[in-house]
Image (spheres, rainbow, N blue to C red):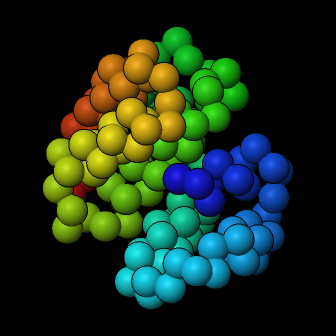
Amino acid sequence: MQMLFQGDMGKQTPEQVRKTFWLAREDESDAEVRGFAEDLYRVATVHAEEIDALIVKHAVNWRLERMPGVDRNVLRLAVAEMLGFKGTPFAIVINEALEIARRYSGPESVGFLNGVLDALGKELIKRI
């Protein structure tokens, strides 16, 4: 989520984000965590248009650019995981997204994110 947020708020390309994000975290040497974060970020950036369209479709009466930056990028992250890692149950993806929101966003965001991700997940599960 932090990589997506950095790119979104800083108007940086994915290449710029990858370079600067990991430079600031050189002490984080867990290759498995870094690999998974990179994979999620890649899916989110490669499928950005599709992800944003799905979010807009299910965030009734909300424009993407009017959402708080954290909420917008938590949604993007969760949808990327739903699209790119179909082996992970959507309930787990949603729960992880809500935990991130509890840490980085306001308390009112949790219900909003849960509603959007639940509706979106129900649509995506039909595709599988």
Q: Quadrant of residue 42?
A: bottom right
The answer to whether residue 23 of the structure is visible from this angle is: yes
Q: From the top left corner, tell me how far across and down residue 50 is, in percent.
A: 53, 50
The residue depicted at 31 percent of the width and 29 percent of the height is 114
Is 123 displayed left or right of 36 in the figure? left
Residue in view at x 67 percent, y 21 percent: 66
Decide if residue 64 is on the left or right side of residue 35.
right
Identify whether 23 is placed above or below 120.
Answer: below
**Front residue of this view, candidates 34 and 4:** 34
Instruction: Single out the residue that lies furthest toward the front.
Output: 27
- The number of callouts visible is 0
State the residue in front, 68 or 63.
68
Q: Position of residue 76 (x, y in %)?
A: 50, 47
In the image, residue 41 sits, relative to residue 58, either above or below, namely below
Q: Is residue 54 visible?
A: no
Residue drawn at x 20%, y 51% is: 92
Residue placed farthest to the top in the image? 61
Q: Residue at x 56, y 18 (%)?
A: 62
**On the rendered image, what quadrant is the C terminus found in?**
bottom left
Position of residue 97 measured from the top left corner of the image (x, y, whole percent): 36, 44
